[in-house]
Amino acid sequence: MDRKIKRQVKTGFAFAILLVLLVGLISLIIFEKQFRQGELVKHTYQVINQLQSIQSILIDMETGRRGFRSTNEKKFLQPYTEGLNQIQPTLADLQNLIKDNLQQTQKAQSLKNSVNDLLKYWNNLGEDASTYTRQRIVEITTFEKSKMDGIRQQLLEMETVEKELLRHREIEDNNSVSNAKWALVIGILLILGIVIILINQILREFNSRRKVEEDLLSNNKELSVVNEESAERNWLLQGLARVNDILQGHLDVAALSQLVLDTVIKYLELKAGAFYVYDEESKKIILTASYALPNSAKKEYDLHEGLVGQAAVEKEPIIISDIPPKYATIDSATVRLEPVHAIYASLFHNNELKGIVEVLSFERIPNESLQFLKLISNNIAVALHGVKEREKVQRLLEQVQRQKEVLEHQQEELRQTNEELTVQAEVLQSSEEELRVQEEELRQINAELKEKNNAIEKAGQSLSRKAKELEESSKYKSEFLANMSHELRTPLNSVLILAKLLSQNKDQNLTEKQVAHAKIIHKSGSDLLELINDILDLSKIEAGKVDLHVENVSVKSIATDLDQLFAVVAEEKGIKYLVEIQNGVPEQIKTDKQKVEQVLRNLLSNAFKFTPRNGHVKLLFDKVMEDNKEYLLMSVTDSGIGIPASKQQVIFEAFQQADGSTNRKYGGTGLGLSITKELMRILKGKLSIESQEHKGSNFRVLIPLDYGDADNSLSIAKSQSNPVKTDIKVVEQTVIPDERKNLAKEDRVMLIIEDDRDFAIIIREFAKSNGYKAIIALSGDEGLYCAKKYHPSAVILDMKLPGIHGATLLKMFKDDEQLKNIPVHVISGSDETDLLTSGALAFLKKPVKKEDLNNAFTLISEYLNSSVKRVLIFSRDNLTEEVGTTLTNEKNYDVVCDSATSLQEGIEKLDKTKYDCIIADIGANIEEGIAKLSELNEHLLPEHIPTIIYLDSDITSANELEMKRIADVVVRKSSSSNKRLLDELELFLYKVQEKKTVPQNKLQKSVDLEVTLQDKRVLLVDDDMRNVFALSAALERQHMEIITANDGKEALQVLKDDKDIDIVLMDIMMPEMDGYEAMRIIRQEMKLTRLPLIALTAKAMAGDREKCLAAGASDYISKPVDIHKLVSLMRVWLS
């Protein structure tokens, strides 16, 4: 029966649905047809409206034309003019509307032709009706009317057709509406019948089923009890599954704790809770996760402490009901709630405590929640145990990984050492094999860690050996550089001395030009010597041969010295210079003052060099703490050009500068900051830089307030020689006879310290022939003993001696108050020329000739005969005291320094006393100083006293040449000027021996006179006046006329003003505008394409020739210029 009813109901519903669909489809078809009919009707009305619009426009145009013909007033033509703009678009719209009707389209085209004919007719009539007669008006009107009647007829015919179409479409539309009504009525009636039948069937079935439902309800009540029990079990299992899901994965203890707690709280719908983990090492129960607890909650508990501690020792959960007020709180921004029920469930795994779960609620916690906590506790304990074990394993793995990284890092360092030290290739190869074995061993299990650590220790020892070898290699390199610098200084010193002798022209056998040439040689040599000194300073630092003189130094004295030194520079350059000492800076620090001032002088010199006019430079002293140590901060801040970030490390490397292009304006070798960095390392200080390009720089220098327990003469390098012992008893030699037993008080005694017995005998004979009594010592120990015992007049000293080394012995002489004034002449087979700055009188390198020994003894005799030297110093500050103190205390010379503050005072002293040298401190008053020195020289004629000019200002090339004429040496105040001043003074007082020489013939011309070059005008462009002077002198011998320019800009101006220049010699590296740019402008902008341009460059690098030729040079020659080659080039280009 049920299946039959269902089938009947389904059949009825299906039939009803089919009827609904059929009725809907019929309605849709009818509605679609009506819509199309409506569109057609709308289209017909649009055509009719368009026809009426055309007729209306033409009527308005006709009316306007008639009004104009009658009045000849153009305002009546406005309808006509507007119609002209409207008629054609209207006709086009009409044609577009009826394009689907061929008959109407043809009529529309005919209509358009008629309208165009009428419009053409009207257009031919023009717009001047003043000449129209009445007859002409009648004719026009008649023709116009006939045309308009024809057009009206055409419009009427088209409108009639459209109205007929409209009538047929209205009839069809009415029929469609009537059919749709009947279809809807019939469909609705059929559907209502089917629905009534179905409702009747359903009601009968419903009544029968109600009785069945009542029977089922009684059965359902019995099943609900069973379902509740099943739901509770399902709830527990579902919660357990959810907890098990979050226990999976690799989490740390804190993350696992928080995730478990959040899940339990949300699943049990509780309000707060906490998760504690038991730390087996500290025996503490530590809070690792919380839910809605205040920050004041206690973070850890001991066992048996509080409810948490008690729950830790009990395996059954502790249930707390009716918690007293304020015992536990849950806070938020707006409320403060107090839970009343709590459960503390302990987590045990294998009878070992792993943690505690605490949950809180505002309502009584149901028994199901307690059962749930018991159910999941074991799983959580197992997961917690697993995470802890994983963390232990992870820590072990990280330890192994760190050890592996250390080992790999050591392997990389060993590989780099292998590349740098190719001599040790085989040893390093074996080390790398060991490291690779060790690397493989690192991948083993934790049981092999002990063996790996032993391998790491061995590798570290090997690395230490290689580092030591690398240090020795670097030291050998630095020592070679130092020795090479000395080799350069030796011939250069001779060049300087001989050039100075030539420039003095005592025999008056040189022309003024030749004297000027000699002065240029001396000036160029001095510049080269200064560069070599910088290289030597750097090489000494790298070789570890720098001595520190640690003493208590006044910070204020450092600031005062630097303020006085750079104040004139700041004023001259128009730069604001400020020296500031902050509060808290100690009055004294323990360090090497000379080295600290050298560092600051280098930094300040750079600051003033790179800071433009109206800029500022600031030197700040302050006390700071770094790494829990007190330092003196000395910062040099400027507003100069700044340093790009990419160059801020490069500038501290030797021979490196931030600006390396040929267009540099500032010069320099790039050694200053490299030396500064090394000095800071020696002083145990720190050097850093902060700079932005075009905004200035800030160099920060940090040095410790107390260098340490260093001696006053602490050597940075470790001594390679044995300690010197002077308190042991020395046995005097008896192998070589000497006169130590026959000495009288008035005798001149010569102590010869030489281990070569044959050479010692030769020197002994020379000493006898020069009136000395000789004492011979064959070792350094014996030499020191004899010097103290016999106190000789002079000493001849070898370097490589047994016992005490010669250099050490010389230092001991100069440090001894009783021996420091004894002149020591060094004769050695090794190059020890730097001993001249350590107090040696002179130096000879073996093998020596008889003439060399004669000269040496002559120098010693002259030194002994002129024991006291006198120096006259023109100065208004403490220069006299500084020079005198240095020469007497540090150089161990007997020197008397007199000062004069005016020219007249100086002349009076010169008339009364014979002086060996004059120092003139002219400061920044260049012109006044030159004038007074010229007057002084005229007063001294014909006598000549060596003169040193000490100045504190930039000078022009003309001033420099004038100073060279009236003085022997010009020293500019700088960071090393005091040392140079003393070196020059010492040279004049003790090292330079005047000798009368036979006048030489005039130098033959090195270049033959070329007729081709005679009377030619040469533009010589070079910013170095020494090069200008030398080339000018050489070219003037060719009877050429020389015009000079200091840079490219000046050269361009000369060429604009002087059109008779025959040839240009163009230097490349110049300030403002370099040679490349100048040559391009000459060729491209000035159009001087036939003017010969010869480029001069000092670089001579690959590609320079091509670069010069591309810029417009005719030819190219590198410096130093070969005059023969230059003259040949000029002859070719001028011929």
Image (spheres, grey):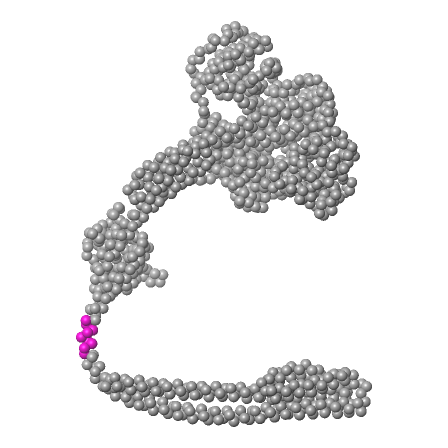
386 left or right of 922 in image: left
Residue at 50% x, 7% y: name it.
737
Residue 180 vertical position relative to residue 446 in the rendered view, above or below: below
Which of the pair 38/967 is nearer the observer? 38
User: Quarter holding the N terminus?
Assistant: bottom left
Splitting the image into 4 quarters, where does residue 219 fall?
bottom left
Q: Position of residue 735 (x, y in %)?
A: 48, 9
Which of the pair 431/879 is nearer the observer? 431
Does the rendering let one see residue 6? yes
980 left or right of 374 in image: right
Instruction: Tell me, yes or no, whether the highlighted magenta stretch contains residue 224.
Output: yes
Residue placed farthest to the top in the image?
Answer: 742
User: Quarter holding the C terminus?
Assistant: top right
Residue at 59% x, 10% y: name it.
770
Query: Predominant secondary structure in magenta?
Result: helix
Q: Position of residue 74 (x, y in %)?
A: 75, 83
Which of the pair 101/1077 is nearer the observer? 101
Residue at 19% x, 76% y: name it.
221
Does the rendering let one see residue 900? no
777 left or right of 493 in image: left
Splitting the image into 4 quarters, where does residue 100 fall?
bottom right
Splitting the image into 4 quarters, where does residue 224 fall?
bottom left
Instruction: Tell me, yes or no, whether the highlighted magenta stretch contains residue 111.
Output: no
Q: Position of residue 312 (x, y in %)?
A: 22, 53
Residue 661 vertical position relative to residue 298 in the rendered view, above or below: above
Query: Which stretch appears magenta?
Result: 218-226
Which of the pair 1082/427 is nearer the observer? 427
Residue at 40% x, 36% y: name it.
429
